Amino acid sequence: MSIATAQSAPSLRHLVGKLVVVVGGTSGIGYSVAQGSLEHGAKVIISSSSQAKVDAAVTKLLKTNPLFAGSISGLTLNAKDVKSIEAFWDKVGKFDHLVWTAGDPLLTNFMEEDLDTQKGIFDVRFWGPVLSAKYAYKKGLFNPGASVTMSVGTVVRKPSKGWAMTAAVAGAVESITRGLAVELAPIRVNTVAPGGVETELWDGMTAEAKAGLMTFFGEHSLVKRTAQPEEVAESYLYLMKCRNVTGQTIDVEGGALLA
């Protein structure tokens, strides 16, 4: 597998040599965004709260393609701590694209979850990317043509019973996508809303329960299959590459909202 260059693949030139920071890039959709960005010729920094996960993901990417050497690195980030967020971006320095896929486990039992847990769901999924974007903007860290891409899910359109607070944080992210697009302009800000995707997010379930959920996702979509993370990652690559899209939430859910 080769790495794109502006000369060898002009249609892919938009990410060649760009620095892409993927918070949540050690697994799932974020990992696939990191890999896709590297394949497009970008330099990538992946991040999570665990150094072990960061190291393992970097090693895995290098095994996938040795040509990624010199283009992939990792940093840890405590997205629940403002000082940690600021220190992280000071280490990163100037960059081109921020992709945020990190998030704590989803809340699915609204009536039983305690208030602190419900408040806390906003820390990583909402405040993490918002404070990151604000700090990077104020410090002049965004390069010309830069973008921010956040993540929600179909719950923002169609919440299930028990998912009220998860829907709330998703709605908050979608709303601030438009607000940040105005505040940070000309820096572009968008969000991706995937449907059911087969990722490590569901690994806390029993194997039987996870298999049942994956079947459910496929049956309740128009494409009749459960998405893989590398498929959904294409929407993040599109939003980084297309410089005429901002303030938008892109639904990538296989027609589940129509099924």
Image (tube, grey):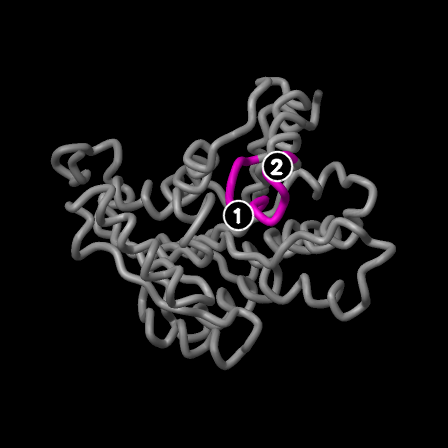
Where residue 179 appears, as percent x and y from the top left, is 62, 57
Mark number, residue 216: none
* Residue annotated with mark 2: 210
Query: Magenta part of the protein: which range?
Result: 197-208
Q: Say few, some or many: other residues with alpha carbon within 10 Å of mark 1 (under 14 / 14 to 19 / 20 or more).
A: many
**Which element carries disc 2, helix, strand or loop?**
helix
Indicate the quadrant where residue 115 lies.
Answer: bottom right
Res 235 seen here = yes
The amino acid type, in three-letter code, at marker 1 is: Asn
The amino acid type, in three-letter code, at marker 2 is: Lys
In which quadrant is the C terminus drawn? top right
Where residue 177 appears, as percent x and y from the top left, is 59, 53
Query: In the image shown, does 57 or 223 lie closer to the viewer?
Result: 57
In which quadrant is the N terminus drawn? top left
Mark number, residue 190: 1
Q: In whole angstroms, how far apart are the C-alphas of marks 2 and 1?
A: 30 Å
Q: Earlier in the sequence, mark 2 or mark 1?
A: 1
